[in-house]
Amino acid sequence: METSEKNVSEKKKSGGGKLSRSETVTVRLDPQLRYLIELAARKQRRTVSSFIEWALEQSLDRVELYHGTGYNGDTSTTLADVASNLWDVDDADRFAKLAFSYPDMLNHHEQILWKLICESSFFWRGDYNTNGQWTWKTEPRHLINERLRERWEELNCVARGELDKSVIPKIANKLATSSRAKNVPDLDDEIPF
């Protein structure tokens, strides 16, 4: 009985029923705007918080990421159009989606982060070329998301100047000739006929 009483009191202290999906944002509002928002919320039978969230969602249709001409089916793209393509619950994956799709929207810290990622062979699928040199392409299908997630905090620390670049692992740039022969499988042995 003591355990259940303890759990109940812990829930009361922590606020219990808060929605985990929400984040708190502090905003300064002009008194007139605040009053009008309260009236609009009343009219829609919402809380002020719920009305503001709704209004912000509606406004995403007006934020253009790309302005098309309408010529040959070239249409404008709004943030609402691509919201599901840009969102991911994981910070690293969400960042990669934005960097690949809209690199011009990266802030300064994110630009440094993206440059670190693009210049590091560790985060990309690649291969040793005929000269034994490691090469990779910075395309979405070549990114190794698991490695990006594993090193996300370190990468951010490097981008902020808190850690040295040397903490980011590297793939050997040059494959030794003797080890190349040992490590590269003979593809004829893999064919089942």
Image (tube, helix red, strand yellow):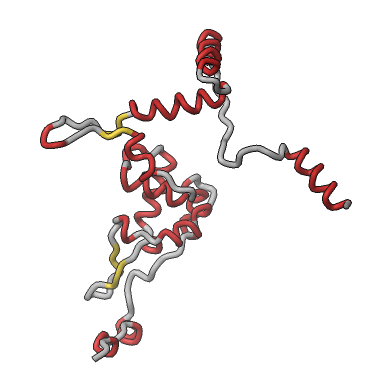
Q: Residue furthest left?
A: 72
Q: Position of residue 63 (x, y in %)?
A: 34, 28
Specify the quadrant that holds the C terminus.
bottom left
Drawn side of residue 86 relative to residue 131, left or right: right
Q: Nearer the viewer, residue 4 or 177?
A: 4
State whether residue 161 is above or below residue 122. Answer: above
Residue 50 position by quadrant: top right
In the depicted structure, whether residue 53 falls above or below residue 73: above
Horizontal side of 2 relative to 124 (left or right) equals right
User: Can you say whether 67 is above or below 35 in the image?
Assistant: below
Left or right of 71: which side holds 91? right
Q: Where residue 132 appears, x then y in whole percent?
A: 27, 75
Q: Judge from the rendering whether residue 178 lies leftward or rightward of residue 10; answer left or right.
A: left
- Look at 31% across and 59% down and name the residue there: 141
Residue at horizontal 50 percent and vertical 47 percent from the top: 161
Q: Residue furthest right?
A: 2
Find residue 98 and report its horizontal and vertical position in percent: 37, 44
For this orientation, the residue located farthest to the top is 32
* Residue 79 in the image, given as x and y percentages of width and height: 35, 34
**Residue name at image x 77 percent, y 38 percent:** 12
Total numbered badges shown on the rendered structure: 0
